[in-house]
Amino acid sequence: MSFRLNPFKVMRAVGIVAIVVYGAVLVTGYKKSKINTTESITKDMKVRNKNFYNSKDYKNNLTLPKQVVENNNETVAKEMEQAKPAETVDLQKNSANSNKQKTDAKAADEAKKKEEQAKLEAQKSEMQKVAQQKAAEQKHQEEAKLAARQAEIKKQQQIEAARKEQAAAQARAEAARQRAKEEAAKKAKEEAAKRARENAKKHQGPKKYIQVASVTTEASARGIAKRLGGNFYYKKTTVNGKTAYVVMSNMTDNPNTLKAMENQAKRAGGGYMIRSVGK
């Protein structure tokens, strides 16, 4: 059988070995640093051993020179002379003083608390006053803004009202001009009609008509009227107790109309006569 190396397994083994070596190096370094630190500390510290009282240092301290001992004694004596005599202690008085001190301390604490409370109240009152002042100023500003907006709205309304009033005035003026124009036209028309009627009255003469024929049969009268046109017609009448049909024109006071009907009568042929109304 052939044996093949798996590269991944080799790499994993190498990694494990590297990690183990690195951990060993770290542990060794930590131990060395701990020993060095401990040695540096112990060099600066003077630790008493169990046999300290048998050591030379202790014995040397016990066998100080005589001059040193005398100097130490003189120093202690001077300090004792300079010290004041001990005072007698009255326990009751001390107790009363202690109670008084406690009471005074308690009163002082209460006074201090009251003073602090008063300061807090004063600060609170001052803060409330400042807050009220700010609220009043803000309210005043808002009222001023509202008043300014209302004034602006009122101004706009006045401008709009003035514009509408101006437009209405222009509309009324235009309507008045239109009415005046219409009235003037109507008056002119009436004046023209009046003048036309007056002129017609001036030129108006007696009403006249044309009598074209008088026949005994209605068929003859109808044929003649039809031949003459729309301005002519016939009517039934009685002449000397006999029935007759008279062909005649419309009545008119206009000479031009009468002349036109004469021409129609001439085109129809036969004689005709012009008669006035009532004759």
Image (cartoon, rainbow, N blue to C red):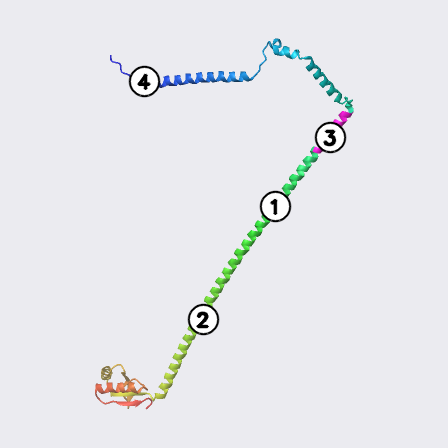
Where's the N terminus, which quadrant? top left
What percent of the width, then of the height, locates residue 89? 77, 22
Residue 10, disc: 4
Q: CA distance from mark 2 to mark 1?
A: 63 Å
Which label sits in the foreground, 2 or 3?
3
Label 1 SS: helix
Q: Where is mark 1, residue-wise?
A: 130
Can residue 244 be seen here? The reply is no
Q: Which residue is mark 3?
A: 103
Q: Position of residue 237 (x, y in %)?
A: 29, 86
Q: Secondary structure at mark 3?
A: helix
Q: CA distance from mark 2 to mark 4?
A: 113 Å
Q: Quadrant of residue 128?
A: top right
Q: Amino acid at mark 1?
A: Val
Region of the chain picked out in magenta, as a range:
93-108
Give the answer, above or below, for where 172 lies relative to 210.
above
Percent from the top left, x then y, of residue 43?
A: 54, 16
